[in-house]
Each structure stands twice: as structure tokens, then as C-alpha cells.
Image: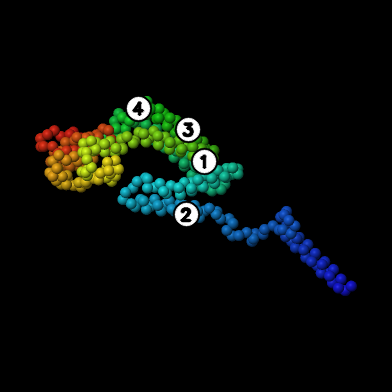
Amino acid sequence: MPANREEDSAAASEVWEAEVSEAAVPETGGPRGSRAALPGDEPKTASLDPGAPVRRLLLATFAFGVLLLSLASTKRGLYLLPLLPALAACIAWWLAGVEGGRAAGETPAAGRSWDRPTLLALLALAGLAATALALAAAVLRWAPRLGAGIDPLRSVPSRPGLAAFALLAGAASAVLLVQLVRHLARRTAPRPTALVGAYLVLFLSWQTAGKALVDPVKNLHDMTAAVARLNPGDGPVAAYRPSESVLAIVNYDLGRRVLPLAQPADLAAHFARQPGAVVLLALDAARQLPPGLRSRLRLVYDETGRKASPFGLAVAASRGMPIAETLK
């Protein structure tokens, strides 16, 4: 009997301690015995954004790559291509966060205070870009004269096409800028999907109409075709102060190397060694030649009026022969 009383007393004590414990700690509505997490139970890193280190790494990769390429002597937009995925991932991450906040019924200001100003700035930039395209097309269509470097652009598109493009770009600019004013007045922000659509239209407009307008007056393939016609063979192509673009395009199109002539004395010596030689030169550089040497040149190929940066092919002529007007 005494043993049974001691066991009953121990069991009653355990029940009482369990009831006191459950009363002191509120339940969470889960299984019996579970309790709500106390303030000190959360890990200290729970409030941190797990994607922040990844985004910082991507942005650092892009920024460091741009810095290195900016220090290089030769700068080409194509060199940035391997860096664009890192920047695109960060932009997509940000857009997804903004859209996620909208889906949850939040405004951009409820999460990150810089979301709304960034969206408004992007909308303003899109409107200004459309305005610039409209003004450029209008100037090309109606301005009387723009200069030797820009006038060749007039020969590429039709005048009705330029007028239609100017009107469409102007209408798009008006729509975007009106939307900007409305969002500023209502203290709202544009939808990211609408901004992506606007920039997609601008990008496609430049890649189609813009590139079709600019490429014919910038490409160097007409020049290399003239070199192949007037200076045939597989020997080196003599060129006065050739740029890196000239070195590359002659090798790419013709499979020939370039013989650079760096100074006027080198050009004169080349003509002395080979009186019938054909020399490739930029006409802007030809105008800087000494008058005596320039007076001996006669152009057999001239891109003046057809290219933004015209090239020519020159041969040596005897003194007293007419000089090409473009070299005066």
C-alpha cells in the first residue's frame, strides 16, 4: 500500500507540472504540446534577403568588367556582350520583386522606397528616347542641310517613310509623357510590364529602322570591293594611317594584310618606289597632307557624299594634272 501511494503521488505531480507548463506558454493551434515561437527563438539572419549576396556579386561582375573594358585602348560595344547576362539577371530580379509586391496588393513604396522613382525615371527616359527618334526623323526629312557627315543619310530612306516614322515616334512620345504626368499627379507608378513593352518597341524600332538608316553610310564593304577591283591580287594593301577597323575589314573581306603608311614621308616614299601604286586613305586624313604631296594625288575611287566617313583610293599623278575637288 505505501508503494502504491508514492506512485500515485508522483503521477499527480507530473500531471500538475505539465498543466502549469501548458498554461504558461500559449499554444499555436498545432499538435498538443506545441508552443508559439518566442521573440528570442528566431534566427538572427531570418530578416536578411537571401538573394542579396547573389545580386551584389552579379552587379560587381558587371561593373568590374565595364571598368576593365573602359581602360582598354580599343572600345567596342560588342565586348560588353558577355557581361549583359549578369545585368539582365539583376534587372529581372528587381522587376519580379516589384510585380510580386503588386500581386500582393502592395504599392512599390510599401517595400523599397526607390522602386517608384526608378519606374518613373525609366518611363521618362522612354518618353525622351521616343522624342529623340521623332526629332531625328523630322530633321532628316525637312531640314535643308545638316553637314557632310549627316547628309548621306538622306539618300537611304524615302521621304514619306521618314515623315511616317517621325509622326509615329512623336505619337508614342506623347503617350509616354502623358502617362508620366498622370503618375506624378496621382502618386502612382507605372507597371513594369508596360515599361518592358515600351522599351521593347523602342529597341525593335532602332534595330530595324535605325540600323537600316545608319548602316549603309557606315559599312566599309563598298570600300573593300573597290580595293579588290582597282588593286587586285593577294598582296598587301597600302593604306595611309589606317584605323583598326580598316585593318580588320580588309583582312576579313579580302584575306589580305594592310601595309600601313604612318607619315606623309612614308606615303611619298611608297609612291616613289611604286609609281603606279594605289593607296587607301580616309579623305579627312588626305586633306591634312602637305600641299605639295596632296597636289600629286588623283582619286580613282571617292566616297564623298555617300558615306559618313568617306574613304578614297588614290594614285600618284604627274604635277600639273587636275586635283580632285575633295582633296582641296
x%, y% of residue 60?
Answer: 44, 53
Select label 4 or label 3 by which is in front: 4
How far apart marks 4 and 2 lie (CA) works out to 48 Å
Q: Secondary structure at mark 3?
A: helix
Is any part of residue 328 visible from this angle?
no
How far apart marks 1 and 4 lie (CA) works out to 36 Å
Q: How is the image coloured?
A: rainbow
Q: Which residue is mark 4?
A: 158
Name which of mark 1 and mark 3 comes first in the sequence.
3
**Which amino acid lies under the numbered mark 4 shown in the image of this protein?**
Ser
Label placed on residue 164: none
Name which of mark 4 and mark 2 comes first in the sequence.
2
Q: Secondary structure at mark 4?
A: loop
Looking at the figure, which quarter contains the N terminus?
bottom right
x%, y% of residue 247?
Answer: 27, 45
Label placed on residue 192: 1
The residue carrying pointer 4 sits among few (fewer than 14), some (14 to 19) or many (20 or more) residues within 10 Å by Cα, namely few
The residue carrying pointer 1 sits among few (fewer than 14), some (14 to 19) or many (20 or more) residues within 10 Å by Cα, namely some
Name the residue nearer the viewer: 200 or 174.
200
Q: Which residue is mark 3?
A: 175
**Which amino acid lies under the numbered mark 2 shown in the image of this protein?**
Leu
How far apart marks 1 and 3 lie (CA) works out to 16 Å
